Amino acid sequence: MVTHLKNCFFYTDKWNALADILPQERHIIGKSGTHAIERDNSNARRHPGRFTRRAKDDTPPTRPAWVQNLVNKQTELKDQ
């Protein structure tokens, strides 16, 4: 039983394991109470993804390879 949470309700899906743990008088089963919670959870999972790195080493090289090739060719043409 959940004894340390006294002044709250528990909104859950129809999952039998929770019915054994939560008090029946404060356990409300259904989607009506979980919709807002699931929306908040979805937003919390989605937004921090924008701030993470795409790869472990995300620092780009000083020049992309195609730019470096152009610079090299221009240098060769100047030297001729």
Image (spheres, rainbow, N blue to C red):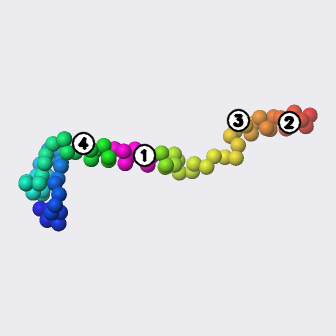
Q: CA separation, marks 4 and 3?
A: 50 Å
Closer to the N terminus: mark 2 or mark 1? 1
Left or right of residue 41, residue 19 in this image:
left
Q: Position of residue 28 (x, y in %)?
A: 13, 48
Mark 2 crowdedness (10 Å alpha carbons): few <14, some 14-19, many ≥20 = few
What's the amino acid at mark 2? Glu
Closer to the N terminus: mark 4 or mark 2? 4
What's the amino acid at mark 1? His
Farthest-out residue, front: 7
Mark 1 crowdedness (10 Å alpha carbons): few <14, some 14-19, many ≥20 = few
What's the amino acid at mark 3? Trp
Residue 76 marker: 2
Q: Position of residue 7 (x, y in %)?
A: 16, 61
Image point (9%, 57%), residue name? 23
Q: CA separation, marks 2 and 3?
A: 15 Å
Can you see residue 18? yes
In contact (CB < 8 Å): disc 2 and disc 3: no
For disc 4, the marked residue is: 35
Mark 3 crowdedness (10 Å alpha carbons): few <14, some 14-19, many ≥20 = few
For disc 1, the marked residue is: 47
What's the amino acid at mark 4? His
Closer to the N terminus: mark 4 or mark 3? 4
Farthest-out residue, bottom: 4
Can you see residue 20? no
Which range is magenta? 42-49
Residue 57 marker: none
In contact (CB < 8 Å): disc 4 and disc 2: no
Left or right of residue 38, residue 5 in this image:
left
Residue 66 marker: 3
